[in-house]
Image: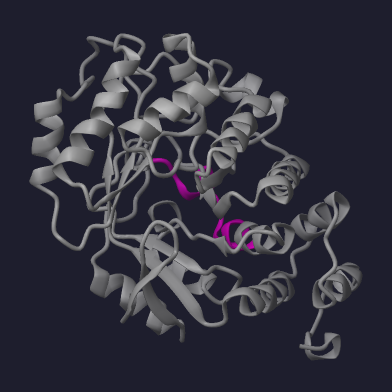
């Protein structure tokens, strides 16, 4: 693609477009300029160009099951509608028998990944979280255990007295194969002190993933955008992840997550705009030049916007999920799951190749 083939409306993007087309790394200032621009089509074209270079027309998805063993949590994050206090109405902590029953009633042989996250339940010992993995590994030895967030790992370190490295090593012995991306929120301390002061700091989140990468784990990472963060903080967040990826190459995918209002009845002015969602995904593709994949999370942005995003830098349409709870407890209005046929329909409808994958982006089959 040549610069003259892009109909740039916002001339402030011309220099950035030149950089992108020549494979030059974008700066903090470039990222802020992109976010301040309303020229979505130019930003989307540039992101599509980068994604085509990396992934061609391939769009990936997997068959996975979300498991949330407990919603009891010591933290009081401002954006969370999922957490409960011990004994509060709706609070739960699954026993191993309940965990197995939950999975047995939702499992089918196509599922290749369990995505396991939950509350920071300080009433349970670290062994509870190890037993969760051991129980699932024994019952479903062929399913990948993608488990726990960077913030949960820091919490396990506190309740166990073990170092981050020791916590990860114990979890790996129990069956851990990858970390989820959650707990990142926005990686600046101004944001974290206001929105999630009881959870892992920016440095601790990054340290957890750095340590995981050193131990040979490939991990996921996220950004929860659309609340109090500045546009500059969104870019700083991406740059901090990019810097770690330069060092370790341990991240497989970046997942921008649109924050949900706490109530499903909230009006559209309390939700992210479609323009902001598409722009954020496309800019993620442009800024994170050392990430192979950017994922669209249909749970938060809906299926139609997910389909459009596949032409604006996205190479991963996520998975079947079976039953998503956390975003829906915070007001998400979307489906809690999609079937394989529906995911394939979305991907092919965007003119892309639908590739079913495992957790590590190994292709299982083309649909």
Quick check: is 242 in the magenta stretch? no
Which color scheme did the rendering employ for the protein?
A: one colour
| Residue occupying the point 58% across, 24% down | 195
- Out of 7 and 292, give the one closest to the viewer: 292
Judge whether 100 appears above or below 319 on screen.
above
Judge whether 103 appears above or below 85 on screen.
below
For the image, the number of numbered tags is 0
| Residue occupying the point 74% across, 75% down | 42
| Residue occupying the point 8% across, 46% down | 105
Judge whether 265 appears above or below 107 on screen.
above
Instruction: Examine the image and state in which quarter residue 53 appears.
Output: bottom right
Instruction: State whether the magenta stretch is mostly helix, strand or loop.
Output: helix
Q: Considering the image in quadrants, where does the C terminus appear?
A: bottom left
Instruction: Examine the image and state in which quarter residue 253 appears.
Output: bottom right
Magenta stretch: give its range.
266-279
Judge whether 251 appears above or below 198 on screen.
below
| Residue occupying the point 68% across, 44% down | 241
Q: Where is residue 342 shown, x and y percent of the image?
A: 28, 72
Left or right of 58? Residue 2 is right
Examine the rendering and report whether any part of residue 364 can be seen: yes
Q: Where is residue 338 shown, x and y percent of the image?
A: 27, 62
- Out of 10 and 154, give the one closest to the viewer: 154
Q: Where is residue 235 shown, x and y percent of the image?
A: 74, 47
Q: Where is residue 72 shown, x and y percent of the image?
A: 31, 18
């Amino acid at each position: 693609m040549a610069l003259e083939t892009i109909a740039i409306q916002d001339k402030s993007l011309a220099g950035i477009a030149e950089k992108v087309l020549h494979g030059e790394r974008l700066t903090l200032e470039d990222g802020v300029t992109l976010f301040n621009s309303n020229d979505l089509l130019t930003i989307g074209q540039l992101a599509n160009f980068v994604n085509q270079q990396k992934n061609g027309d391939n769009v990936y998805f997997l068959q996975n099951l979300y498991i949330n063993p407990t919603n009891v949590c010591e933290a009081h994050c401002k954006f969370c509608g999922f957490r409960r206090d011990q004994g509060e109405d709706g609070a739960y902590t699954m026993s191993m028998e309940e965990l197995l029953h939950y999975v047995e009633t939702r499992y089918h042989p196509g599922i290749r990944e369990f995505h396991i996250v939950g509350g920071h339940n300080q009433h349970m010992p670290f062994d509870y979280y190890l037993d969760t993995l051991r129980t699932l590994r024994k019952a479903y030895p062929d399913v990948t255990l993608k488990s726990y967030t960077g913030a949960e790992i820091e919490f396990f370190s506190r309740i166990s007295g073990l170092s981050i490295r020791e916590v990860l090593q114990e979890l790996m012995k129990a069956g851990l194969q990858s970390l989820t991306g959650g707990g990142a929120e926005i990686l600046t301390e101004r944001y974290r002190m206001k929105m999630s002061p009881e959870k892992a700091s920016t440095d601790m989140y990054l340290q957890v993933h750095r340590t995981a990468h050193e131990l040979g784990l490939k991990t996921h990472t996220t950004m929860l955008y659309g609340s109090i963060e500045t546009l500059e903080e969104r870019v700083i967040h991406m740059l901090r992840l990019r810097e770690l990826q330069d060092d370790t190459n341990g991240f497989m995918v970046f997942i921008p997550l649109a924050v949900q209002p706490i109530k499903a009845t909230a009006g559209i002015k309390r939700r992210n705009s479609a323009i902001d969602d598409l722009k954020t995904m496309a800019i993620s593709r442009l800024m994170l030049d050392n990430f192979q994949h950017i994922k669209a999370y249909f749970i938060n942005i809906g299926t139609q916007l997910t389909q459009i995003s596949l032409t604006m830098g996205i190479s991963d349409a996520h998975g079947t999920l079976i039953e998503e709870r956390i975003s829906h407890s915070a007001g998400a209005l979307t489906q809690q799951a999609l079937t394989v046929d529906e995911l394939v329909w979305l991907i092919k409808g965007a003119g892309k190749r639908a590739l079913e994958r495992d957790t590590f982006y190994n292709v299982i089959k083309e649909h």
